[in-house]
Image: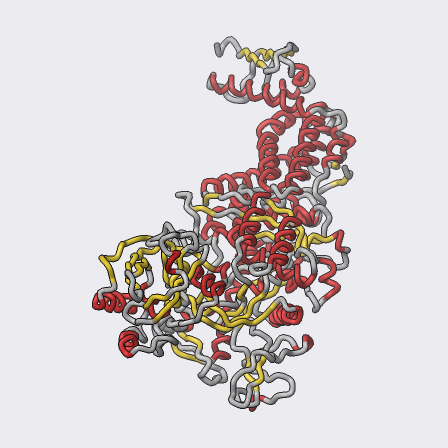
Amino acid sequence: MTNRSHSFNVPDKPSLDGIEAKWVDVWNESGVYHFDRTKSREEIFSIDTPPPTVSGSLHIGHVFSYTHTDTVARFQRMNGKSVFYPMGWDDNGLPTERRVQNYYGVRCDPSIPYVEDYVPPAKPDPKRQVPISRRNFIELCDKLTTEDEKVFERIWRTLGLSVDWRHTYATIDDNSRATAQRAFLRNLARGEAYMAEAPTLWDVTFRTAVAQAELEDRDRPSAYHTLSFHREGGEPVLIETTRPELLAACVALVANPDDERYQPLFGSTVRTPVFGVEVPVVAHRLADPEKGSGIAMICTFGDLTDVTWWRELQLPTRPIIGWDGRIVADPPAGLDSEAGRVAYATLAGATVHTARERMIGLLRESGDLLGEPKQITHPVKFYEKGDKPLEIVTTRQWYIRNGGRDEQIREDLLARGRELTWHPGHMSSRYEHWVGGLNGDWLISRQRFFGVPFPVWYPLDDEGNPRYDAPITPAESALPVDPSSEAPEGYTADQRGVPGGFTGDPDVMDTWATSSLSPQVAGGWERDNDLFQRVFPMDLRPQGQDIIRTWLFATVVRSHFEHGSLPWSTAGISGWILDPDRKKMSKSKGNVVTPIDLLEKYSSDAVRYWAASGRLGTDTALDEGQMKVGRRLAIKILNASKFALSVAGQDTAVDASAVTEPLDRSMLAALAEVVAEATAAFENYDHTRALERTERFFWDLCDDYLELVKARAYDTESPAGASARASLLIALSTLHRLFAPFVPFVADEVWSWWQEGSVHGAAWPAAAELRTAAGDGDPQVLAATAEVLRAIRKSKSAAKLSMRAEVSNVVVRGKQADHARLAGADIASAGRAEALDFVPSDDTDLHVEVTLPETVE
């Protein structure tokens, strides 16, 4: 324990008012959180901080999980690590586009020419959006996200995140675009990325492809319709379907190969009702004999099972739903009869809902709808941000292999997941289940505008058709590029769209295709290789459990292919935030709470206290009562620190050798145990345990120890007084540092009253140093002494006496009596006891008998 002399500067009335603004400025000016890039990899702790989506507002769930990460960052920094703690902004993709559309009252139309110095409508009307060029639209996206990022940064600073604000990035900035395009080109060169024309899950509202990880099932009402398919010279075959509007897209009927009812039909054909198209009856193991009539129609495409049947049975394609979600104008191949074409014409151009109603009418007229539809409720697949059920259309898209169709890649990625240290450990099962259940590769292209463009052009043949088999790619040194506005090497701008010229890939990357490279973007991969070698692979990926399947898995995929390693060694997974009714908070439910009012009402430290009270992976309710407790703790730290410093007096040396009294040594021995437990808890990513243990000791110290040694500490003449004062200052220094990761504002405030520099640049307390100062101190002495003092107080309270009232005698019995005897003088002083009697016995419980003055009795 270092000997130091301090001069105290304690305010007359400590307060939490204005504490955030004061210390945010101090921290910013001092650079206490700046990353020291001269350190070696072994001396660095690097965090792959989640880049929040800036196309909205931060909510209390962000505060919850980011506080967890910040406690870890602060702990590691105080442990001597140079902490690489960057902040990113996830600002590309659909959420930003929607926000810009609504905010400015515009929509993107790539066919419209660019307008210099475009000014959006003075009075935006989200319902009457003005079409503008793609470039103008992207400029508005850039403008609005820049403003949103400033708002987010102010909130993060107010919360006290110890981010190094010199290290920020945005997923649409030049560095991010170059990184994403470089990684894609390397994936393409190695064969991990590929283009394919295939059935694609499609959101008809946003007119974009959707990946498996972005799906969610929602229960919707529907109905089974029994349809009659005709057999030549035989009884009709009855099928049940919830999608009669897809009848024109039917390519086969399918039944389970073991279903005896339909085995005689395998290899034969039937004719579709109304349209009269001849389709085969086939067998496949996925057909469920217990579902409906046991035989189903295969349409291209009604659901993902249709896709599997179509692919494995090598069936023809007869798509009838367009990108806009309406029935296409031209009838599909094979629908040749005049009556069938007339029937199809009544459906062409209709929405799916309207086409269903019209198809049911046609089936009733033909007599092929048997009975009335049977109403049901069943899960339907939606894009997580969409409002209409997904359709499946055939499109040309980019994919990255992820093990969905390659068993070896799947096993390799499962092995990566097992290399990762998970906190809590059970979250690894979510990774295993997701990877094990993949049924296709990762679809990374989106038919949107504000995103990272694919760095690919295609030569046009003599008829102006793109040659997708001969893509043109740029050199990495040219990145980032925008094929929609730049020409590839060897071509000129006037050759765009001209036969024999070129065309740019019109799509942008899925936002996860950029976010999955957050370690590479933040770490300077191929841009600042010195930095990258110091921070990668990173130490920690903190994130939510709902994006294990997206962000975490996708980042593992990219790192596995590019670096042959994990992107980080540890994943810390947060739980859900629940509303006061214990329901998960979500924007769709409308029960999300924004943090500003709570931060202003209770203080940032109080809100952080509530957040830190929730363990990783554990669902936690929004609890303003817990925030009130946090505020009370912060105020108590102010007041207790002021009191302890006033007792210690001015210019008191923190001299561990001065600690001589059994009670003081006991207190420091107990505090050493707290430090050891808090340190172990943090090392195991259990910040909540560290807080609980620290807080419990602090309240006991305030309630008991301070009262026990107060009188002795004021004695400036005796060694016993010097022991009390030295112990108080050692405890105060230790507790300020223990609390620093959780309540950083109040911790630095009280630290500044008597210490140089910031508590956040101080060393984390060491249990060994405290044990040295404690010498032969036994924590049981403090425990027994505090119990005796509490018994004396209880007796006075029961007698309705002042705590300053005298007591005649105190008798202490039990195994711990000798422990209490060692602090007899402190008990007598604090309890105002005229006489003390300690009677050791084998009784493990401590019994205290208090005799009050006779006048009271």
**Viewer-closest of 269 and 696:** 269
Q: Quick check: can you spot residue 257?
A: yes
Q: Residue at horizontal 31%, vertical 75%?
A: 348
Position in image of residue 758 (x %, y %): 67, 49
Please state which of residues 246 and 103 is positioned toward the viewer in this rendering.
246
Q: Position of residue 593 (x, y in %)?
A: 43, 52
Q: How is the image coloured?
A: secondary structure
**In-front residue for pair 526/19:** 526
Q: Is residue 122 above or below residue 2?
A: below
Q: From where the camera sits, is residue 23 visible?
A: no
Q: Residue at x 69, y 47 (%)?
A: 78
**Relative depth, front residue between 581 and 821:** 581
- Residue drawn at point x = 78 percent, y = 38 percent: 3
* Quadrant into which the N terminus falls: top right
Residue 362 in picture, x, y percent from top left: 24, 69
The percent position of residue 554, horizontal first and vertical second, equals: 58, 59
Whether residue 545 sits left or right of residue 656 in the image: it is left
Q: Residue furthest front?
A: 233
Query: How many numbered discs sit on the rendered protein?
Result: 0
Could you tell me which residue is drawn at 62 percent across and 13 percent down?
A: 814
